[in-house]
């Protein structure tokens, strides 16, 4: 009986003119576009310069700032008041004001004054832009002092920073595994819900309800096709990540497939629970939109869960998306194995039992 129900599900999926296109086109679109667009690295910061010294060193410092690739020169203002107008109009993000006798003080005492004023309406751009600019200015100061041989209060200790797991700070290496998780969530979690609700609207599900097919068998027949589709999507994600971004998992693919097999059951079970309580496509879409927004924003996709307030971390503890995203990033970037990921395994297994048990119990089968 289960064999024929699964065969029916696959035929129903591929006869639909919409679903196969979504299943096979969506991974390409999301993995081709989102890793480039969903980037928290701030660039193209518009800079207004007020040079009150007009010396060779001040000009050299400005050129060094522009050569960093993070800043675009908006204008050279004659006063701070004029530069503030460009901030207010939105043409500039940061003002760099170089004080008079900048070169003289730098050569004489080893220190010189500049003033940085940032537009903090966009706090991310203002904060990171100020940090970038401060780092460049400190580096420039070190270069000048090294060339001139002037002794200063700067410590002679030289620090070398080594970044673990993502040494080139490539944000795509951080985002691609997470986007694969989002793909599995959308395609394997919420498509089954829409599929069942569409059967309710058409009336074909009533033909199943009047048969001796049990609730557990019916739910299983809905889970297995999307479980298989989930593995296909996951494999497509691996291939796209390898060929397009040269991103290969540092750990074992078998570890990812094991956790993915459980995670697909989790999100498919959640989708089936939603379908059991929804009578129309519109109702199901609203419920899915509500859940997908919370799951994504509370998963650590863009901001670390550890940076959330305590109540936010408590809510995130009940988010299965968080655990599988941790697994994907840990295996891809760190090469973690089963021993390091046992808490995530226990959490996902618990979610799978809970949601699929709920789906079986909440399915209303009329005879």
Image (tube, rainbow, N blue to C red):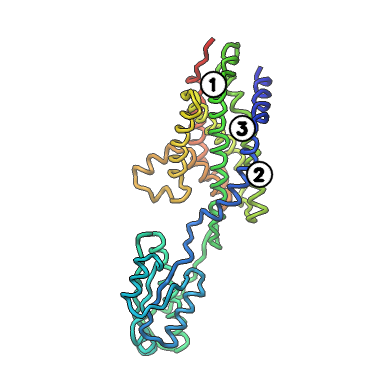
Up-down relation of residue 22 to residue 173 (above or below): above
Residue depicted at 52% across the width and 40% down the height: 342
Residue 224 percent location from the top left of the image: 62, 28
Give the SS element for disc 2. helix
For the point 44% across and 68% down, the residue is: 46
Q: Which mark, residue 227?
A: 3
Earlier sequence position, callout 2 versus callout 3:
3
Query: Which residue is more in the foreground, 44 or 105?
Result: 44
Which residue lies under the disc numbered 2?
Answer: 236
**Residue 290 picture location, percent across and down:** 43, 36
Tag 1 residue: 200
Would you place residue 62 above or below residue 56 in this image?
above
- Could you tell me which quadrant the N terminus lies in? top right
Q: Residue at 44% x, 85% y: name it.
A: 57
Q: Given contact means CB atoms under 8 Å apart, are the residues at marks 2 and 3 in contact? A: no
Depth-wise, is mark 1 or mark 2 nearer the camera? 1
Front-lying residue, 22 or 209: 22
Report the residue at 51% width, 28% height from top.
281
């Amino acid at each position: 009986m289960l064999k024929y129900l699964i065969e029916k599900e696959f035929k129903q999926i591929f006869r639909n003119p919409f679903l196969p296109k979504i299943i096979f086109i969506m991974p390409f679109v999301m993995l081709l576009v989102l890793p480039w667009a969903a980037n928290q690295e701030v660039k193209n910061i518009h800079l207004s310069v007020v040079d009150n010294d007009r010396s060779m060193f001040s000009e050299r410092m400005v050129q060094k700032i522009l050569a960093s690739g993070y800043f675009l020169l908006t204008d050279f203002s004659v006063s701070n008041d004029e530069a503030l107008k460009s901030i207010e109009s939105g043409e500039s993000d940061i003002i760099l004001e170089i004080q008079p006798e900048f070169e003289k003080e730098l050569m004489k005492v080893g220190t010189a004054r500049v003033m940085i004023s940032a537009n903090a309406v966009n706090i991310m751009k203002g904060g990171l832009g100020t940090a970038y600019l401060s780092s460049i200015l400190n580096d420039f100061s070190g270069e000048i002092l090294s060339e001139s041989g002037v002794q200063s209060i700067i410590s002679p200790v030289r620090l070398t920073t080594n970044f673990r797991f993502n040494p080139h700070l490539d944000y795509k290496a951080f985002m691609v595994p997470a986007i694969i998780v989002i793909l599995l969530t959308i395609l394997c979690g919420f498509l089954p819900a829409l599929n069942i609700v569409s059967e309710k609207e058409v009336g074909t599900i009533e033909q199943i309800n009047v048969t001796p097919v049990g609730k557990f068998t019916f739910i299983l027949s809905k889970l297995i096709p999307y479980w298989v589709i989930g593995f296909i999507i996951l494999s497509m994600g691996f291939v796209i990540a390898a060929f397009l971004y040269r991103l290969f998992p540092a750990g074992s693919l078998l570890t990812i497939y094991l956790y993915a097999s459980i995670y697909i059951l989790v999100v498919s079970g959640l989708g089936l629970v939603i379908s059991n309580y929804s009578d129309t496509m519109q109702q199901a879409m609203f419920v899915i939109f509500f859940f997908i927004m919370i799951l994504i924003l509370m998963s650590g996709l863009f901001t670390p869960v550890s940076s959330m307030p305590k109540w936010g971390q408590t809510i995130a503890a009940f988010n299965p998306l968080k655990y599988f995203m941790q697994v994907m990033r840990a295996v891809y970037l760190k090469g973690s194995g089963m021993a390091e990921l046992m808490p995530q395994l226990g959490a996902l297994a618990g979610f799978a039992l809970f949601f699929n048990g709920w789906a079986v119990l909440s399915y209303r089968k009329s005879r």
